[in-house]
Image (cartoon, grey):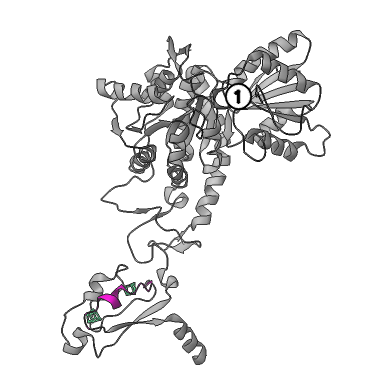
Amino acid sequence: MQIIEDGNTAAALGVRLCRPQVIAAYPITPQTPLTEKLSEYVEEGSLAAEYIPVESEHSALAVCIAASSAGSRVFTATSANGLLYMHEQIQWAAGARLPIVMCVVNRAVGAPWNIWNDQQDSISQRDTGWIQIYCADHQQIIDTVIKAYWLAEKVSIPIMVCYDGYILSHTFMPFDLPQQKKVDAFLPPFKPDYALNPDEPANLNTVTLPDVRVDVHGELAHGYMEIRYLLQKDTRLALQEAAQAEKRFAEVFGRGGDPYIEPYLCDDAEYIAVGLGSITYQLRVCVDELRREGIKVGVMGVRYYRPFPDKVIAGALKGKKAVIVFEKAISYGYEGALASDLKSALYEYLAGTGSLPVIQNYIAGIGGREIRTDNLTKALKAATKGRVAQEPVWIGLKL
Amino acid sequence: MGTGNYRRKTSHSEHGPGDGGSTGSWRVERPFIDEALCIPCRRNKEACFICWLYCPEIVISRTIPPVVDLEYCKGCGICAEECPTKAITMVDEARFAHDNKKKE
Ligand code: SF4
Ligand code: SF4
């Protein structure tokens, strides 16, 4: 059924379709309408979940960690400083291998205080062991939430479903609302191998020694390093499982595509713009305009940021003259994190082949600074004429 | 955890000696019980056992004399602190290492 709703509602509807049993969240702009919707669903009885109000984001994730350890399907959501406040528990959830799904409604982080959109919040959580998926429209938001539960529970790794604050969260768009019976067919109830149970007491994630140990059953149990290595290994394996999720989703719902990247006019392109989230759809407008001028450009949205689909990306960018990376976040002291990751993937797969593209990094829309399409087109066009600058260039900076 | 063996991928332990690892290897000081001062030893009667009650690692036996399982005693010294007759002294592990060397 096609409906018209805002992005936060798309996320809330997606979450409700997945039948979470416990929801704990603390409201923060621009995520607030999402958690309000979910609490309304619980109140009116259209979602049979326990909604646990908490006094902070740190507690919200702590509740989710506990509930997930007890075998429940859980959900939380946050933005910006709320996400940063969760940071300690974010690492914990990944190390504990809990399949928590969290929406991150992207917003700039303080200081100075700012409630508008950029992606510094989720990008700063890149190395926490969570899977990160970026959405570019409302259909992707609702579909990604559903796929995320399947994938998280398959590989036992928590997932952040990221979408731009306001640009997606507060704008209205038509999208297809999946049928409950199809979602139920796609996503079976959560069945953990072990759930906290007083009849079968266990210690979870207590002090774990540097070395392996013999447990009470006389079996060799992992040390900290083995557990962390397995997190890395399984996060890489999640790339394959993501393809499986996409395939199964397409079978049930009849839509989907490449799980990792979203190319637009890339096949014959000589120059490719790359980005995360809604900016990639805005870039399509620039690409269309430059194509009319005869410049062969395309745009590639990166959907999975962690695990990073390095091989797929390197394959898609092979032989291109230039790759122009537009980012709403920066790794202070160097450049955009996505630009660095792209360089590393390209180096890994294309070094020595003579087909390494030039990389131009643009920083845009920091703290909600309006990204004007004409400025974006200008920047893209400039980068097709050769390297604009070695350092990342901030678009629309008034200095 | 959806597939595979959950216990193998996370830190999961069960109640029982040693499932938290061999805590005895952490010890800097070793409790030594002087039987001449220990109440149950002196009276040859089941009595006191304050050390057994307080040991957080549950590694002191309720026997005459009380025996410390050095495999898991982490050397915290709580037993020595709580013993009403000061029968327990904490002895530097280095001394035992030294004695062992001498024996070799
Ligand atoms: S607490 Fe002291 S006196 Fe009492 S049983 Fe233990 S060692 Fe003996
Ligand atoms: S109380 Fe501490 S020092 Fe005494 S036996 Fe127990 S672990 Fe060892």
- Disc 1: which chain? A
Residue A14 position, x and y percent, is 41, 22
**In the drawing, does residue A89 fall left or right of residue A22?**
right
Badge 1 density bin: few <14, some 14–19, many ≥20, Cα 10 Å: few
Q: Is residue A274 above or below residue A235?
A: above
Q: Is mark 1 within 8 Å of ligand 2?
A: no
Residue B101 position, x and y percent, is 51, 88
Residue B56 position, x and y percent, is 30, 67
Q: Nearer the viewer, residue A235 or A241?
A: A235
Q: Which residue is mark 1?
A: A258
Q: Nearer the viewer, residue A283 or A331?
A: A331
**Count of numbered marks:** 1
**Ligand 1 is located in which of the four quadrants?**
bottom left
Q: What residue span does the magenta drawing correspond to?
A: B74-86
**In the drawing, does residue A310 fall left or right of residue A230?**
right
**In the drawing, does residue A30 fall left or right of residue B46?**
right
Q: Nearer the viewer, residue A312 or A67?
A: A67
